[in-house]
Each structure stands twice: as structure tokens, then as C-alpha cells.
Amino acid sequence: MPDHPPRPHGGGSSARDRAIEDRLTALVELARAGDSEAFGQLYDHYVAAVYRYVRSRVGDTHLAEDVTAETFVRALRSMSGFTWQGRDFGAWLMTIARHLVADHYKSGRVRRELLTGELPTNTPSREDTAETAVDGLTKQMLWQAIGALRREQQECLALRFFSGLSVAETALVMERSEGAVKQLQLRAVRNLARALPRDLQ
């Protein structure tokens, strides 16, 4: 069976989105063939999202930088063997990052999943007027509330909102169905709302 990249669900993507997808697909194919320049362009495209995810999970800037770098080192080593098989390349990178974060926790090198004192310095590119309006104390309270969620709920929020992955991409990374991810996200948001003071909801 031919090895083709997955197409997004729904068919509602714009011509610009499709052009970006086609460009990324071409870069992946070149990188699979050993083109280091193509891999460099993939790095430039995905590094911010990978970093945001890792930073939201480990809570330490330097560790997040190290894990992000190791994610791309491992991806580079494995590029020749990468196959689409229904996977998005960005979701594949997130899966590598997720396993590296889990390895850090298992090794005892990270004692806490979340830093309760601050939100990641790199936030998603989408404009969020509510976020820009809050002060440091509000951010701290929000971060503490996220830290009180169950691990899988934290991870779902990190992938969906810090890294900006779609439900389908998050499902690939978490190895769950899209329906399960939607339910997990719903529970996480509800629990987060309950944990926040009434004036912040």
C-alpha cells in the first residue's frame, strides 16, 4: 500500500492551508531522503509548538530547551524510517517529546509536572485578549489550578492549547480516539472552571 500523508478531516481547509500542508509533506519526503536543509525547515516550522508543549509539562525553561532539542535529534536519527501510516508529522514529533518527558519523570530528574509559579513564556500564536488582560497573580492561580488536574487532563490541555494541536492530532499523540480526547478536554475544562475562584471563571 502506498505511503501517503494523512489528509485533514472535514475538507474545510483553505487553499493557503492546503499549500502549507503540501509544502510540509514535500519537506518531510526530502528529509526522509537525507536532505538536511529540508529537515532544518521542518525544525523551524515545528520547534515553537514542541517547545510550548514540553515547557508546559516540565515547567523549567532550560530542561524544556534540552528536551525540545533531544526531540529533534531523535527525529533526525529516525527520519529515514518515518512512515505516514495515518500519522501527521507534527503529531509524530509530539509523540517523541511526550516519551522524552515521561522518561524524565521515570528517571526522577523531574519532581514536579508543572511549575506553579508561572505560565510558559512562549504562548500560542493565536491572539487571546483574555490572557493579555490578566496580571501575574491571575496567571499563577490559573497555573496552580491546571497543576491540580489529573495528569492526562493536563496533557490534553497542553497539547490542545499550549501547542495548538487539533483534536485529531492530540488523539494521535495520546493514542486515544478523537471522541475520547473531546471528552477528556471537556472534563479538564470543567474541572479547571470549578477550581478557579468565581471571579476568574
Image (cartoon, rainbow, N blue to C red):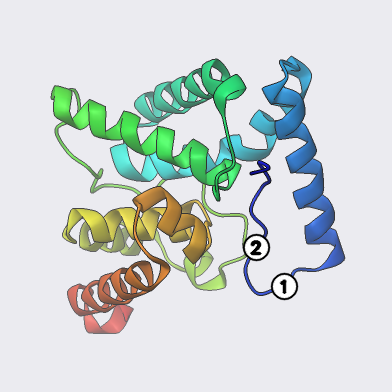
Residue 110 in picture, x, y percent from top left: 19, 29
The quarter of the rendered structure image containing the N terminus is top right
The residue drawn where x is 46% and y is 28% is: 68
> Which kind of residue does numbered mark 2 sit on?
Pro
Q: Amino acid at mark 1?
A: Gly
Q: Is residue 121 above or below residue 171?
A: above
Mark 2: secondary structure: loop
- Please name the residue that numbered disc 2 is placed on: 8
Quadrant that contains the C terminus: bottom left
Nearer to the camera, 114 or 160? 160
In x, y percent, where is residue 39? 69, 24
Using the image, determine if residue 32 lies above or below residue 165: above
- Name which residue lies at 77% across and 19% down: 37
Decide if residue 12 is on the left or right side of residue 172: right
Q: Is residue 121 visible?
A: no
Callout 2–callout 1 Cβ contact below 8 Å: yes
**Real-space Cα distance between discs 2 and 1?**
7 Å
Decide: few, some or many residues near mark 1? Use Cα within 10 Å; few <14, some 14-19, many ≥20: few
The image quadrant of residue 23 is top right
User: Label 1: which residue?
Assistant: 11
As helix, strand or loop, the secondary structure at mark 1 comes to: loop
Q: Is residue 105 visible?
A: yes
Q: Nearer the viewer, residue 35 or 126?
A: 35
